Image (cartoon, rainbow, N blue to C red):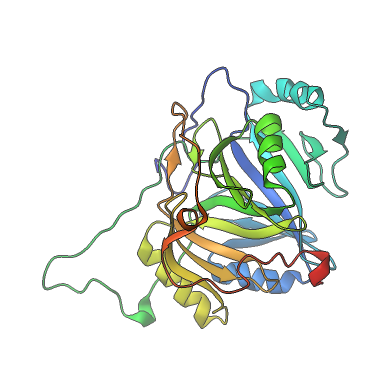
Amino acid sequence: MTAIMGYIGASRRPGVLGIHSMDGFNIQVPDLQVASDFYSAFGLDVREEGNALGLYTHGHSHRWGSLTEGPHKRLSFLSFGVFEDDFYMFRKHVEDSGVALIDPPKGFQSNGIWFRDHDGNIVEIRVAEKTSPSEKSDFPNASVPANQAGAPLRSRAPVVQPRRFAHILIFTRDVDRAVAFYCKVLGLRLSDRSGDGIAFLHGVHGSDHHLVAFAKSDAPGMHHLSWDVGSINEIGLGAMHMADKGFARGWGLGRHVLGSNYFHYVRDPWGSYAEYSADIDFVSADYDWPAADHAPEDAFYIWGPTPPEDFAVNYESDRLR
């Protein structure tokens, strides 16, 4: 990463219309104080912003997402960033694709256009600075020479602070339709998939292996938010810190196959997850990733503990409320 604590220099594939970043998201939760406690413990910079909470990473000015209060936890909308000179072409492209524009959700204003995806999720496209990485993030694996202690005392262990938002995985009724919609309308590209169970999409202007992923369910919903950290050690430190704060339920340490990232998932108070992620695959703006359809055993994780039985359960489904 060129500048861990600042914006990364933008990359671009000339002549190709496509979003460059996930600019933000909004999630409704039943209790903002509970949410603030969870995400602050996770290592984010949680800021009160009127009747909402803003999710930032420490030392970074971009607001990665917001939380508002509602009767149930649910994903409210996704916001994607485009280059300024692409915006009006994007507006025409969306309308020419037969997608109807809608008004912004109540209480939200922007310079963007709003519409619904194949599942009814609200999506925004807006002019924004590129916040997805334009090169692969640093992943140091430093050791120490003989006769030196490599680990700090646990009482002096630092609190992990994620560097940036990495990706979101959302549930969909139809993975094929999700891939078709987000590739056609937003210009994302398929990285990898496993049948009709899961698919991973990246940005054409340079991004991680996936900005957004889709997993099959009976209803829309959010499975996890992923946050980039700098090492396996930071993943472990973050997991231990969250367990000490009372958030011991989750899954990890392990390594995924598709995307290759090391992970630990921490279950939030509403049944979805926050993921510490490190060393995910990167797709450059000038590279065509060879997308493939993988068997289930080659699509989940290459090593790690057995996941919880309800790891893939969509707790935003009406049948579970």
The percent position of residue 175, horizontal first and vertical second, equals 67, 46
Instruction: From this view, report whether residue 173 is shown above or below residue 103.
Output: below
Q: Name the residue rendered at 46%, 49% in the picture.
A: 259
> Based on the displayed image, in which of its 4 quarters is residue 232 positioned?
bottom left
Instruction: From this view, report whether residue 110 is shown above or below residue 295.
Output: above
The percent position of residue 196, horizontal first and vertical second, equals 64, 48
Instruction: From this view, report whether residue 306 is shown above or below residue 287.
Output: below
Q: Name the residue rendered at 83%, 27% in the picture.
A: 98
Residue furthest out toward the top? 15
**Relative side of 92 to 100, left or right:** left
Quarter of the C terminus within the rendering? bottom right
Given residues 298 and 208, the one toward you in this image is 298
The percent position of residue 82, horizontal first and vertical second, equals 64, 31
Instruction: From this view, report whether residue 4 is shown above or below residue 275.
Output: above
Does residue 12 appear anywhere in the picture? yes
The percent position of residue 86, horizontal first and vertical second, equals 66, 22
Q: Name the residue rendered at 76%, 58% in the picture.
A: 218
**Relative side of 153 to 49, left or right:** left
Q: Name the residue rendered at 59%, 74% in the picture.
A: 309
Given residues 66 and 89, the one toward you in this image is 89
**Relative side of 78 to 261, left or right:** right
